[in-house]
Amino acid sequence: MATPAAPSALAAQARRVYMESLLLAVPTAVQGVLDGAHRLANEKAEPQLAHKRMNAAIDLTRPAPQWQQALIDSLGAMPRISTSGGRTSLGAAAASSMGSGRDTLQLVDDDTIEVEILSSRLALAMMDKASWEFTDLRARMSSLERREELDSGDALRPHVVARIVIDSWRAAGLSLEHWRTVQKVIHAAFGEMVEESYHETNRWLLGEGVRPEIDLRPLIRRSTGAHVASIPVTTGFGDMAEAQGGRRANVVIAGTTTSTRGAGVGEETRLMTRMSNLARTAGHAEAVLGRLNKLVGRQVPSFADTAEMQPSTGFKRAIAEAQSGIQRQLATTGRDERAAISTPALLQELQQRKQALKEAASTPVERATIEIVALLFQSILTEEKIPAVVRVWFARLQMPVLRVAVSEPDFFATTDHPARKLIDRMGACVMGFDISSRAAGDALDKEIKRVVQVVEAYPDTGRRVFQTVLTEFERFLEHYFKTENEATRKGVSLAQQVEQRETMAIQYTIELRKMLNEVPVQEGVRNFLFHVWADVLATMALKTGAASDATKVMKRAAADLIWSAGAKVSREERADVIRRLPPLLKTLRDGMAEAGLAPEKQDEHIQALNDSLAAAFTAKAAAIPAERLEELMARLEDLEEMLPDADEMQIDESIVMDLSGHESTELQIVTEGGSMPTPAMIAWARELQVGGWYMLEHRGRIESVQLAWHGMRKQLSLFVSQQGRGTLFQQHRLASYLQAGLLVPAQDEALTVRATRSALAKLDADPQRLLN
């Protein structure tokens, strides 16, 4: 019997596997950059950009061999630089250059800063592509080497490889300008290179029996001295954040700001230490599917053929029989669905049906498809966070999905297949919270049941039926959170009122600006009308109606204020202003009180108006003609008819700076916190789907919340806790919370992506099961 290898020996060998994989992949990566540069040069673009791309493609060709050799030499030299106890790190000079600015502040030249920025972007692109593989490998290596974390200069870290890539580029005489021109193809090529190297190393370690199941709990970090837990750190990318934080501390040209929460650079770069958040992207999911297709393609070459396959009649009959059998099995459980789905008996039943289907299959592709779908659903059905009553309906989806997967091979090639999207959407709605506190049999459960029964009822419709029920499910969710879910119904109603009021306030502001564009009114009064009184008019219109007497009183107050703020050249006019001012100020206070302004805020506005009105007494400008005032009053009375279309407006922070006036015990308004979001984070904020669960850190509390509502153009978003407490974000603030890691998905991956990764691990360990 062979003696198991010592952990240190396994770690050292794993590092050799990693380095050999990197070195073997270098020519492919370099060629990928060359090919990508030529593709860019052939794409249509603005003349200046097209010229730059053409020059880059031409200039890359000659020094490419030198770049490739410099890259191979640098990577090959890494293990010989410094090896201690199985750990590999950069040499002192390299580590010093990458860590400059962390411990001491010093002036650095623009070229060094640019290299750091480009290197950091490449490292982030690598992590976006390979985050899960790196997380698994890091956990395995930490276990073998008996330490909590990889060294900051460890060769396994992507930022180390990224720095070598760019240093080799420059050593070959290539310019940073050319790098920026073809940056996206460099990111793609080397992201795939490190992902494949991590994957090969993980596969080798799995073959040696090293931690087949990864538990990430030991990697969770707690904030020092805090009374609440910080967001888990799942990738060990903290040194990358420090490097970027150090750069931002010295250079203002980066265009970022520190966190408003007072934690400085640590909060600003917080997300960079939680790269699993970026794993939510379609790119990550597609990478997982790509690995699956590569692995299966090695065993079943014809599996990669995307031409539509037609299963035999016998195989179709076998799937139908299996589906009927599963339906009968679940129907006999009666009301005890929880017990039935929780025992191994059903999984054993599914395993037996899988074997029967494989015997009925006529091609290796069909047998491989059966195995993969079975592994996917094995993972889904053993997911503890799915309530048992819902798990039953997921079990009944297995055969309809198998039928689609056999006849539509793109089920395994794209994340956009409606069958995948349906499973992910249903899973996202039921997986983010404590299932023990959830009432079974509510409208969501009934809708999932209906969806599955519709799919079962149309066995030959395939993609179309999945797309149809997916669309119906999306519509159901919008209605469900508004009207049927007890926890979210009130919060959604309040959020809709906020949006309606803010939309109308913006409409009033736009029209008031038009009306006063050529009217000589003191600036302080203009600001009051645009920023305060427009909201008062909107509030009164919503509370009492646009044509109500109360709203008319507020409109008349606006006209009186405009007249009072005009130049007063006669003693009679001034006396009239003094006489009419007390009731006007009372009306203004009443209106501000109706809009929810605190007394101290009212005092501030009244004082500013007093100053403006006092200035009007000494103004030398022309008075507002009486006929012009009458025209303004007439337009104010008919203001609603002139308002711009709400569908064409956007509620953004440039117009609505503060929603805190809408705060109540049932609805919290997030007006601060987070960090400066990137365009990618703003795009992510717009992608969040209703029904998904998230962990929110806000006002000293971390809790599970569900996205229950998006407003027009997703400018406002409402999250609701299990206790029914609503938290409302504007889009930019939502992106800020995502950026800072204060709002993170309860599930880092979609349900089918997680299931695919689980299937990959099993197929990695035993590829022959595809054909058995």
Image (spheres, grey):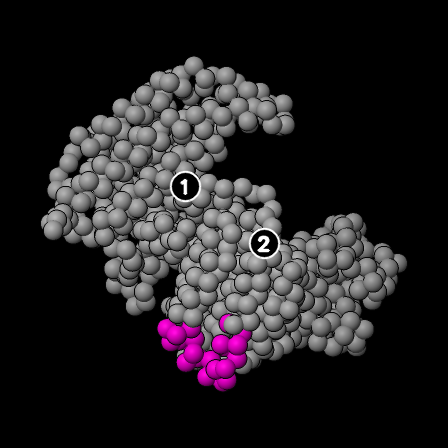
The tag on residue 11 is none
Q: Residue at x 59, y 43 (%)?
A: 307
As measured in the structure, the alpha-carbon distance from the residue carrying label 2 to the one carrying label 1 is 24 Å
Q: Position of residue 514 (x, y in %)?
A: 77, 53
Residue 641 among those drawn in magenta: no
Q: Left or right: 75 with respect to 652?
A: left
Of 687 and 457, nearer the camera is 457
Find disc 2 in the rendering and name its residue: 312
> Which SS type dominates the magenta stretch?
helix
Task: Report the amino acid beneath label 2.
Answer: Ser
Does residue 7 lie above or below 52 as drawn?
A: below
Q: Residue furthest right?
A: 627
Q: Nearer the viewer, residue 171 or 39?
A: 39
Residue 455's spot in the image, x, y percent?
A: 61, 66
- Report the magenta residues as a range: 326-346
Residue 527 appears in view: no
Residue where numbered disc 1 is placed: 298
Q: Does 618 sit above or below residue 690?
A: above
